[in-house]
Image (cartoon, grey):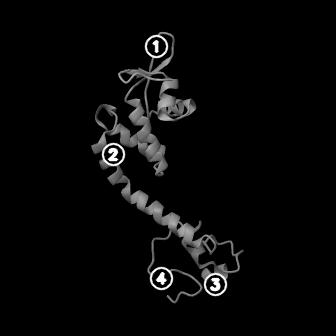
Amino acid sequence: MTVAWNTKELTVGQLAERSGVAVSALHFYEAKGLITSRRTAGNQRRYPRDSLRRVAFIRLAQRIGIPLKTIKDALAELPDERTPNREDWAHLSAAWRGELDDRIEQLQRLRDDLTDCIGCGCLSLDRCPVANPHDRLGEEGPGARRIDTHLSPPQTCRLTPSATC
């Protein structure tokens, strides 16, 4: 299905084909207030052409791990809820940088410590008593204390069997 370059509105099928996003996902985005459409006299959806850029923005933000609520809030901050441009993306991505850095650190910890104790308090791994003796991390609260950077900020000395802290 070819869409003329000067088409001002797209059907849901055209938007799905051009954006590479399933029709059901577009309906979901619309229900969540991320994109908008108007209804024709026959009750069919018509999306403004700039919805292509908006959907691309949403998909890219999702790929880097930004939650839909955060994306929606960011889009709502744009004047007249317009489609993001290059400057908007630079501003929003700078605001998300800290969150992304934290997520990267969590993934690196997970990768590096996946076969080691994560501080969950289960004491089922042979090394847990060594890395987390007497479930010391349980005193800090629930969850995987050594992996989640929200729970355990980076330390200069990591708790490993060979560490001397």
Quadrant position of residue 122: bottom right
State if disc 2 and disc 4 touch (CB < 8 Å). no
**Mark 1 neighbour class, 10 Å CA radius: few under 14, some 14 to 19, many 20 or more:** few
Q: Is residue 89 left or right of residue 112?
A: left
Question: Does dot 3 land on a helix, a strand or a loop?
Answer: helix
Residue at 60 percent across and 71 percent down: it is 118
Residue at 54 percent across and 72 percent down: it is 140
- Residue nearest the viewer, comparing 16 with 113: 16
Any mark on residue 89, and which? 2
Q: Residue 96 appears at what percent x and percent y?
A: 38, 53
Q: Is residue 113 left or right of residue 15?
A: right
Task: Find disc 1 in the rendering and name its residue.
Answer: 40
Measure how far apart labels 2 and 3 are at the Cα level: 46 Å
Residue at 44 percent across and 36 percent down: it is 55
Quadrant position of residue 117: bottom right
Task: Find disc 3 in the rendering and name its residue.
Answer: 130
